């Protein structure tokens, strides 16, 4: 039902960036795409998102030349959901190899949205990794904890790691 409701919007805005697109169109495309792929679980768009994710990973870092950052996060999330820990590890490598704030933000957004319990543990462990910048911690935790499946384990993790987290964010 949800996919049927929003599919016409996706068809109207299209998957690819157009020269005439303004900021509103870019944001609308990313939001509709994310809704259809992650919430409505539209299998055709999930397949397309998986294909997009394969084109994003490049030897020299994440390739954002052909896809908007918001859609890139969603595509990476689909790949994470499908491929699990191995893909998670690849993304973490790319995250820590990059100095580009946009690239790091896209990867963090994708990683933070995972709702698989074992990957969730890996996401929370990243918070204490000194290679994660202190200004990236709030975004990662906020996005992660907003996912319903992550709330209870995330809250338990926060309670048990409060002193370590406090030391990380106060520096």
Image (cartoon, helix red, strand yellow):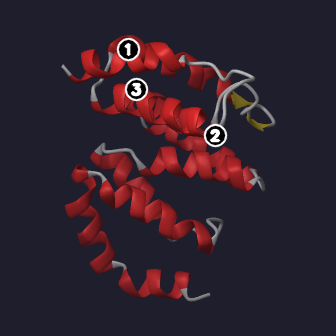
Tag 3 or tag 1, which sits nearer the N-term? 1
Say whether marks 3 and 2 touch (CB < 8 Å): no
Q: Classify 10 Å Cα crowding around label 1: few (below 14), some (14-19), many (20 and above).
A: few
Q: Separation of disc 1 and disc 2 at Cα?
A: 20 Å
Q: Residue at x 24, y 71 (%)?
A: 156
Say whether marks 1 and 3 touch (CB < 8 Å): no
Mark nearest the camera among 1 and 3 is: 1
* Residue named by callout 2: 23
Label 1: element kind: helix
Q: Position of residue 44 (x, y in %)?
A: 39, 10
Q: Position of residue 136 (x, y in %)?
A: 58, 66
The numbered disc on residue 8 is: 1
Q: Is residue 109 visible?
A: yes
Q: Quadrant of the C terminus?
A: bottom right
Residue 115 position by quadrant? top left
Label 3: element kind: helix
* Residue named by callout 3: 82
Q: Position of residue 19 (x, y in %)?
A: 75, 23
Please state the total of marks drawn on the protein image: 3
């Amino acid at each position: 039902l949800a996919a049927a409701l929003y599919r016409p919007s996706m068809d109207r805005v299209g998957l690819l960036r157009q020269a005439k697109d303004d900021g509103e169109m870019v944001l609308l495309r990313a939001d509709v795409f994310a809704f259809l792929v992650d919430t409505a679980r539209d299998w055709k768009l999930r397949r397309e998102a998986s294909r997009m994710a394969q084109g994003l990973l490049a030897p020299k870092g994440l390739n954002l030349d052909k896809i908007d950052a918001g859609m890139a996060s969603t595509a990476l999330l689909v790949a994470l959901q499908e491929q699990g820990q191995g893909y998670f590890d690849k993304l973490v490598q790319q995250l820590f190899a990059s100095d580009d704030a946009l690239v790091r933000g896209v990867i963090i957004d994708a990683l933070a949205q995972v709702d698989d319990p074992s990957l969730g543990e890996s996401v929370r462990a990243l918070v204490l990794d000194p290679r994660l910048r202190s200004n990236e911690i709030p975004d990662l935790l906020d996005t992660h904890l907003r996912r319903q499946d992550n709330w209870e384990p995330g809250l338990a993790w926060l309670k048990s790691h409060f002193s370590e987290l406090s030391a990380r964010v106060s520096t």
